[in-house]
Image (tube, coloured by chain):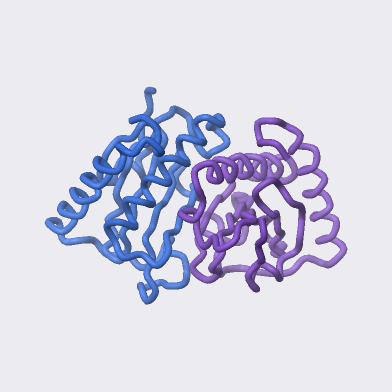
Chain colours: A blue, B purple
Amino acid sequence: MAFELVAGLAAKEYVTDLKLCRVLFEDNKYYPWIFLVPKKENTKNMTNLNMEERFQLMREIALAESVMFKLFSCDQDNVAMIGNMTPQLHVHIVCRKQGDPEWPDTVWNRTTGKYAPEVKAEIIAKIRAEFETQKQNPQYGQF
Amino acid sequence: MAFELVAGLAAKEYVTDLKLCRVLFEDNKYYPWIFLVPKKENTKNMTNLNMEERFQLMREIALAESVMFKLFSCDQDNVAMIGNMTPQLHVHIVCRKQGDPEWPDTVWNRTTGKYAPEVKAEIIAKIRAEFETQKQNPQYGQF
């Protein structure tokens, strides 16, 4: 599949590749936050995926939720496809905690703050390693 | 499947039932907006669904997107599972238009305004009828 990330997503940190999606990291120290971006050309939203691709996206969302719940203390995960500003399908997976800066509101266009670079590198490495471990589970599809 | 809607969802208008989900309507005249609520007990978020249920949820999301794009003029649909305030899995499907009151921001906890009752009844009837037509399409599962 030939695909390119639009500018808003190309600026995000790379985590790993899954069968359908590239995993990217959002540099916001208040919330553990990743994206799943289907590696398919001209994909603005889910209506550009066929049903088999939608099922694989769902498997990879399940994998991403499992990774994030394992690594971080989450009271709730927010899973969202919005795309008003970035015209390429990307699924937000955000760990939320009661008492986080915006709880119980949503996180979009609110509190931001960057990680210290060494902390960020460590968190991305942890997320990548956990994806490597869990993606062996056949329920998430063949990787 | 025995299930009950939590208070925040029980207050929403009923649209129709699908195989997995109940479809509810959000009374916000600025955005065509529905919810899919899996009819399964003790379902706080998607991690409470097994993979077959997740696939059926994805089929029903695809059906709901198709219904909403057919009926309303949408530039983008927002599909989101948040659940910070309402502890029962519900998928937001919101039609967005460039120039709508919050575009390109998100819609949660922002501009609200109720429909006139007769307009609301007419829109719900239109959405219900379109679900009845499109759910015959076998790609959305057996209803």
Q: Residue A66 versus residue B64: which sits nearer the camera?
A: A66
- Number of disc labels: 0
Indicate the position of residue A124 as horizontal and vertical percent values. 21, 50
Q: Residue B13 versus residue A69: which sits nearer the camera?
A: A69
Residue farthest to the top, as pictured:
A1
Q: At x 36% / y 47%, what residue is drawn?
A: A64
Which quarter of the rendering shows the N terminus of chain A? top left
**Compared to B32, does A97 lie above or below?**
below
Q: Residue A72 versus residue B79: which sits nearer the camera?
A: A72
Residue farthest to the left, as pictured:
A118
Viewer can see residue A14: no
Which quarter of the rendering shows the C terminus of chain A? top left
Residue farthest to the front, as pictured:
B2
Q: At x 61% / y 44%, what residue is drawn?
A: B61
**Compared to B42, does B126 lie above or below?**
above
Q: Residue B31 versus residue A55: which sits nearer the camera?
A: A55
Q: At x 48% / y 33%, what residue is drawn?
A: A43
Q: Is residue B52 left or right of residue B121?
A: left
Q: Is residue A74 left or right of residue A59?
A: left
Residue farthest to the right, as pictured:
B118
Q: Is residue A20 left or right of residue B74?
A: left
Indicate the position of residue B3 as horizontal and vertical percent values. 65, 62
**Quadrant housing residue B37:** bottom right
Q: Is residue B106 left or right of residue A134?
A: right
**Compared to B127, does B63 lie above or below?**
above
Indicate the position of residue B103 as horizontal and vertical percent values. 55, 56
Q: At x 74% / y 69%, what residue is drawn?
A: B114
Viewer can see residue A60: yes
Indicate the position of residue B124 as horizontal and vertical percent values. 80, 55
